[in-house]
Image: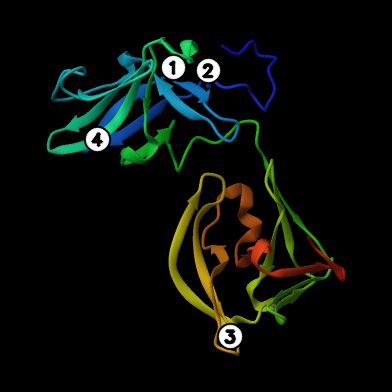
Amino acid sequence: MSSGYDKPPFKAPHIEDPKKRVRVLFGGEMVVDTYKPKLVWENPFYPVYFFSLSDFKSESNSVKDGLLRDSDQVGEGTITYDLYVKDRVAKEAVTEFTGEGKYKELAGLYKLEFASADAWFEEDERIYVHPKDPYKRIDVLQTSRRVRIEVNGVEVANTKRACFLLETGLRRRTYIPIMDTQVEYFTPSDTTSVCPYKGWANYFDVKLPNGKVHKDIVWYYRTPSAECIKITGMVAFYDEKVTVWVDDEKQE
């Protein structure tokens, strides 16, 4: 358990009490409803929620052998359960930590796989992908520095109205007003993704005059979350797949 003085990156597992009500929706029922969740870092990258058995709820079944049914998957210090609500089943969705093996600190706790549920809520607000890391922040800074982007030698963006998005532990991303790009090279992609900090992203392919298509190298957020509202109407490029200059200095 955290002493209150630990700082990231944590040695796994690191456990904190987030002081939030957490609810989990599955099959039309709130299968978890608790004021005492545990926020656990199993790895240095992001936390997940763990629960006590008493945090699980069922309107129609007992919790053990009703809501949670043994999946016959037993690991070192873990027992895995299927999650049942009426005619809905999420296979191997819940893991119990028994205290044996390497994670003795997690004894008596249960982890519900985030993607197995229909929706997660902190207080009355829905969350996506995983809980936000309280030690991570995002800054979106407007810049008047000249930013140019090329794909295979073809200029696809040129602006002095960019925003730099800085996210703890990750590479800086540059967001550019879409009207400062060569939108005639963009074709909509069916690809989507979701970020717990920024929201739902859509993508563009870039089709160059020579006909070559670069798949999903541009993305944007139609309705970014509040902390990233400045990137509304902007697009970002995968710096790893394009050539970027900032004030005529090539970025590595």
Task: Name the side, left or right, on which 196 lies relative to 231.
Answer: left
Quote the CA–CA distance across marks 3 and 2.
50 Å
Closer mark to the observer between disc 1 and disc 3? 3
Question: Looking at the rendered structure, which numbered label has been put on residue 184?
Answer: 3
Between marks 3 and 2 in the image, the one whose residue lies nearer the viewer? 3
Q: Are marks 3 and 2 in contact (CB under 8 Å)?
A: no
For marks 1 and 4, give the CA distance: 25 Å
For marks 1 and 3, give the CA distance. 52 Å
Q: What's under tag 3, amino acid-wise?
A: Glu
125 lies left or right of 156? left
Q: Residue 17 got which mark?
A: 2
Residue 150 left/right relative to 24: right
State the residue in front, 208 or 196.
208
Residue under the point 41% across and 10% down: 100
Cα–Cα span, label 2 and label 4: 28 Å
Q: Which residue is mark 1?
A: 36
The residues tagged by marks 2 and 1 sit, at their Cα atoms, a distance apart of: 7 Å
Q: Position of residue 76 (x, y in %)?
A: 38, 17
Q: Give the residue at mark 4.
A: 91
What residue type is disc 1 on?
Lys
Q: Tag 4's secondary structure? A: strand
Disc 2 vs disc 1: Cβ atoms closer than 8 Å? yes
Q: Is residue 245 above or below residue 54?
A: below
The structure residue drawn at horizontal position 63% and vertical position 66%, both measured from the top left corner, is 234
> Which residue occupies 64% across, 66% down?
241
| Label 1 environment density (alpha carbons within 10 Å; few <14, some 14–19, many ≥20) | some
Query: Residue 70's quadrant in the figure?
Result: top left
The type of residue carrying mark 4 is: Lys
- Residue at the spot 30% in from the left edge and 32% down from the top edge: 93
